[in-house]
Amino acid sequence: MRILLVLCLCLPAWVDAEIYQWRDTDGSKHFSDRPVAGAKKLAIKPGYGFYRVKTVYDGDTVVLEDGRKIRFLGINTPEVQHRHKPADAGGDEAKRWLIDKLKNTKVRLEIATEKTDKYGRTLAHLFTEKKQHINLQLVAAGLAAVSIYPPNLLYVNELVKAQDQAELARLGIWGRPEYAVIPVGRVAEAGHSGWTRLKGKVVDIRATRKSVYLVFSDAFEARIERKWLDLFPDVNSYLGKTVEVRGWLSKSQGHLSMLIRHPSAIKLEA
């Protein structure tokens, strides 16, 4: 399986990480951890300053004393209550854990390829003064699920390993009925909002100019954008296999789909 990793996964956190970026003939961006003809090298430089956390917004978002809003890279915790939306199962637990963990300490940020998201939040891995990796510990405790958004691939191996162990031990969200796997045939009646786990057989694979689709039924398919295909094994290897996909459902014209950004969001049935 060819999984794209930034070089710094195998190096100490203080070493600059590098990946390569290039565009194909259609103008789509591609990334690799190996040199490619015509590619330019992107350097990832982690930060070194320590900051006090002013506010814990939820399990994966905080505000620093300098006013920056930080969204944790590589993970997703259940939502807490906001406005008129009730909290997701496990959301309050993740927030309480984070508040307790960040008491009487400062944090440093390690930023990957993309510095901010579309909401202007700084994207980062957080480390305490005692070198505790907060993103990783949330996953290890079963309070967060791995959620990789390429090209931000720092610590992907460590995060996936921690999730596998937490899932096996049924820690946190992995022991909650709200996050149990839903068979694809029941997805319409389940009406599940938020982060979801679906399982079924890939009965067909179809391709468009921008995406490749794993078709599970007439009502549901998983979509992989072509610019990230280098991260995945041969997608044809999924055909006829029973797999679990993890992510957020979207609906268009009565049809449900799920965007799969990274192979960690697909699990083959053992």
Image (cartoon, grey):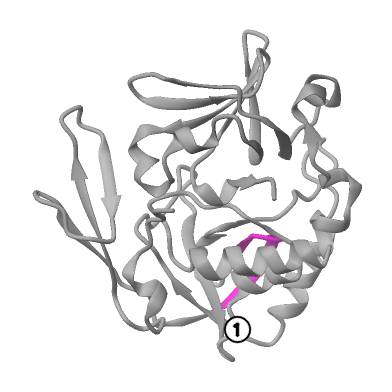
The majority secondary structure of the magenta stretch comes to strand
Q: Which residue is mark 1?
A: 132
Is 86 contained in the magenta span?
no
Q: Which residues are magenta?
A: 52-63
The image quarter in which residue 227 lies: top left
Q: Is residue 170 visible?
A: yes
Q: How many marks?
A: 1
Q: Quadrant of residue 103?
A: bottom right
Q: Position of residue 100 (x, y in %)?
A: 77, 78
Residue at 37% across, 56% down? 4
Q: Residue drawn 28% across and 61% down? A: 33
Instruction: Please tell me whether mark 1 sits on a helix, a strand or a loop.
Output: loop
Residue 48 or residue 133, whichever sits in front: 133
Residue 26 in picture, x, y percent from top left: 20, 27
Which residue lies most toward the right here?
A: 177
Q: Is residue 173 above or below residue 157?
A: above
State whether residue 5 is above or below residue 27. Answer: below
Residue 54 on the magenta segment: yes
Q: Does residue 2 appear to the left or right of 192 in the view shown? A: left
Residue 79: x, y in percent?
Answer: 75, 48
Disc 1 marks a residue whose amino acid type is: Gln
Instruction: Give how far across and how far down residue 14 sits, in percent.
Output: 36, 83
Is 189 on the left-hand or right-hand side of 212? Answer: right
Residue at 70%, 71% in the rendered image? 140
